[in-house]
């Protein structure tokens, strides 16, 4: 079975230990028949057999030996059980650790489309609860199954040696128990698949709510969020109860069958003792070991439930385990080359699934040039710049960097040549210094300060309680929007990339600060091609060229002066922003 093959594959490094653990489980469980056997001998020889009273006085040594044997075997079994459990725990923790590292790397290696399609809460569930379930199955479920089967088999063999007919009487119960268990397993399986999905939804809702706590509070939507969470929680709880209640439908039958073992033993076994077909000692051995037949029937429900959970969880883990990204970073770059920064878009079109977002885009940027991109919201600006570091691949056409199709460049090398400050600023829970030096953790402190100054961030950082060592909260909590943008800008410039992409990076800073940033960007000490998405004319005015995007197409291209002259979209925006006379004024100039 594929799932077990997968487990076996991932047990690599611990296989010998795990097999030893399984072997010890079998040995330890087989030893359970020893004490009933000794008990049988004690009863027949010293309690109920012929001449028992005489044996008691003449063979005391044997009695003491047998009793000590019982104690010894009990201790041996306990010790074996201790070491076996230890080995199961160790091996299962090792596999958990290894697979978690593998999955984490796998998730890191996925492309943007993967993140578009997978919910964070679901990925977190896979990395935690699902993996724990797999560990539990190795450490407990498999152990329980092996031990129950061994005890069952050992008891049956031993019983056959004593009396085959009585054993067959007891085994009459096995087929109906197996049928009931099989029906139960089939019914409960889809419920655990559903339960796993409900858990994932609950985790996703919780994660989104916590991550978006500010928005929730800003809109005073706590009640709505609580309601949403409660709904998911109720669904999960209902699914849990439903799965648990199914067991109750089958539990009485299995419990009755388990009890019936004892009833059959007392009835048939009692008759056999009266007929002197078996001795009292042999009857006592049956009594002492009958749990070996009935106990597996009692635990079968728990084991089946856990197996179904295991399959549901494992199928989720396997989804991540074997997911292969379309854009693969092979991390082959040994010495990363520094690019010149020449960028060219050749007949580029792009689709998210079936929606075309960019169509026939053609433009080129020379090394050191600054290109500004402007356009209405949703026009495709971010999508366009995402194609340069290959966050997505084009659907048609080519994106070239230094004359080479980006699909042919080594991803690490390409991306290390591009500094990006994204629209949605994400800072890590780390010091400000650590955040700025994210691309180069060995960066000297003076350099961190230098880049912070270029990004107009130094002054406010200095005023923070611990200056550059101030730890910012998750996603930069504790900083204003403009402050976050400036740290993100410093982080992007700090890698001194030959290509710098800024996606609306100064939208939240005041005009004076923006002017300072613009000046710094123009005077960077290293050669750098800049692509700047901006909505403000003050940002775009000094660019070498401006591209206007509308509906995924370039509708205007030129310098500030050229575009003003054209009296198109750019001119409208300019008038709106700078003349302050709005649309009415434009009407006066003969525009729409
Ligand atoms: N990951 C995605 N999956 C599917 N569609 C997307 C995705 N990202 C963006 N889109 C769609 O692509 C179109 C262009 O989005 P894009 O983010 O490139 O626009 P934009 O010009 O940068 O907008 P804004 O100025 O608001 O940032 C939009 O219609 C958007 O809904």
Image (cartoon, grey):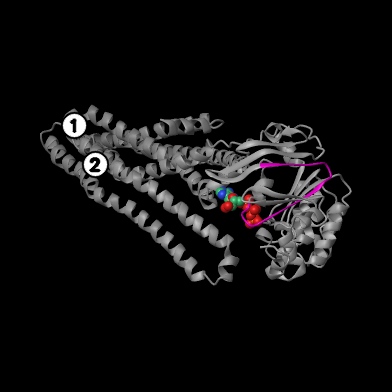
Give the SS element for disc 1: helix
Whether residue 397 sits left or right of residue 454 in the image: it is left
Asked if residue 318 is among those painted magenta in the image, a careful observer would answer no
Q: Observer-nearest residue: 91 or 295? A: 91
Percent across and percent down for residue 464 are 79, 66
Residue at horizontal 58 percent and vertical 62 percent from the top: 212
From the image, tell me which residue sits under label 2: 180
Is 508 located above or below residue 250 in the figure?
below
Residue at horizontal 59 percent and vertical 36 percent from the top: 326
Image quadrant in which the C terminus is located = bottom right
Residue at horizontal 26 percent and vertical 49 percent from the top: 251
Image depth: mark 2 or mark 1 in front: 2
Nearest to N terminus: mark 2 or mark 1: 1
Is 487 located above or below residue 14 in the figure?
below
Whether residue 214 sits left or right of residue 315 in the image: it is right
Is 17 located above or below residue 305 in the figure?
above
Percent across and percent down for residue 111 are 61, 41
How crowded pointer 2 is (Cα within 10 Å; few <14, some 14-19, many 20+) is rated as: some
- Disc on res. 168: 1
Residue bounds of the magenta highlight: 361-379
């Amino acid at each position: 079975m594929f799932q077990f093959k997968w487990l076996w594959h991932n047990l690599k490094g611990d296989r010998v230990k795990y097999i030893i653990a399984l072997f010890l489980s079998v040995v330890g469980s087989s030893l359970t028949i020893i004490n009933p056997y000794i008990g049988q001998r004690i009863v027949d020889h010293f309690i109920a057999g012929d001449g028992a009273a005489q044996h008691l006085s003449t063979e005391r040594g044997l009695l003491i030996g047998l009793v000590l044997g019982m104690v010894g075997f009990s201790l041996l079994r306990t010790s074996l059980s201790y070491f076996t459990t230890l080995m199961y725990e160790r091996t299962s923790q090792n596999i958990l650790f290894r697979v978690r590292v593998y999955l984490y790397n796998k998730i890191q290696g996925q492309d943007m489309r993967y993140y578009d399609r997978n919910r964070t809460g679901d990925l977190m569930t896979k990395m935690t609860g699902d993996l724990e379930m797999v560990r539990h199955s190795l450490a407990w479920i498999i152990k329980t199954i092996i031990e129950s089967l061994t005890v069952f088999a050992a008891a049956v063999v031993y019983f056959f040696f004593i009396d085959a007919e009585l054993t067959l009487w007891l085994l009459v119960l096995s087929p109906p128990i197996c049928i009931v268990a099989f029906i139960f397993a089939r019914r409960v399986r889809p419920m655990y698949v559903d339960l796993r999905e409900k858990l994932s939804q609950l985790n996703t809702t919780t994660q989104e709510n916590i991550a978006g706590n500010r928005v929730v509070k800003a809109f005073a939507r706590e009640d709505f969020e609580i309601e949403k969470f409660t709904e998911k929680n109720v669904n999960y709880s209902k699914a849990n109860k439903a799965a648990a209640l199914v067991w109750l439908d089958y539990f009485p039958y299995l419990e009755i069958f388990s009890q019936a073992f004892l009833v059959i033993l007392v009835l048939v076994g009692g008759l056999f003792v009266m007929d002197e077909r078996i001795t009292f000692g042999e009857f006592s051995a049956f009594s002492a070991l009958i749990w070996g037949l009935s106990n597996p029937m009692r635990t079968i429900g728990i084991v089946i439930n856990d197996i179904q959970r295991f399959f549901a969880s494992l199928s989720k883990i396997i989804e991540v385990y074997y997911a292969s990204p379309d854009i693969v970073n092979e991390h082959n770059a040994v010495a990363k080359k520094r690019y010149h920064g020449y960028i060219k878009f050749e007949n580029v079109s792009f689709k998210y699934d079936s929606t075309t977002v960019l169509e026939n885009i053609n433009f080129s940027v020379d090394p050191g040039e600054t290109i500004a991109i402007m356009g209405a919201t949703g026009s495709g600006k971010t999508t366009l710049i995402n194609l340069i570091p290959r966050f997505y691949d084009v659907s048609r056409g080519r994106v070239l960097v230094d004359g080479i199709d980006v699909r042919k460049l080594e991803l690490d090398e390409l991306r290390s040549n591009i500094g990006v400050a994204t629209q949605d600023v994400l800072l890590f829970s780390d010091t400000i210094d650590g955040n700025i030096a994210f691309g180069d953790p060995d960066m000297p402190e003076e350099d961190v300060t230098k880049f912070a100054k270029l990004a107009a961030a130094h002054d406010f950082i200095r005023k923070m309680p611990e200056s550059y060592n101030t730890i910012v909260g998750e996603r930069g909590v504790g900083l204003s929007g403009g402050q976050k943008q400036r740290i993100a800008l410093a982080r992007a410039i700090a890698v001194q990339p030959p290509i710098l992409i800024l996606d609306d990076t100064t939208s939240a800073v005041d005009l004076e600060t923006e002017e300072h940033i613009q000046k710094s960007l123009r005077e960077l000490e290293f050669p750098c091609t800049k692509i700047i998405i901006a909505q403000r004319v003050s940002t775009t005015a000094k660019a070498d060229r401006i591209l206007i995007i509308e509906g995924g197409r370039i509708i205007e291209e030129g310098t500030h002066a050229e575009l003003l002259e054209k009296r198109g979209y750019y001119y409208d925006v300019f008038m709106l922003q700078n003349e302050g006379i709005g649309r009415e004024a434009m009407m006066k100039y003969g525009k729409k």
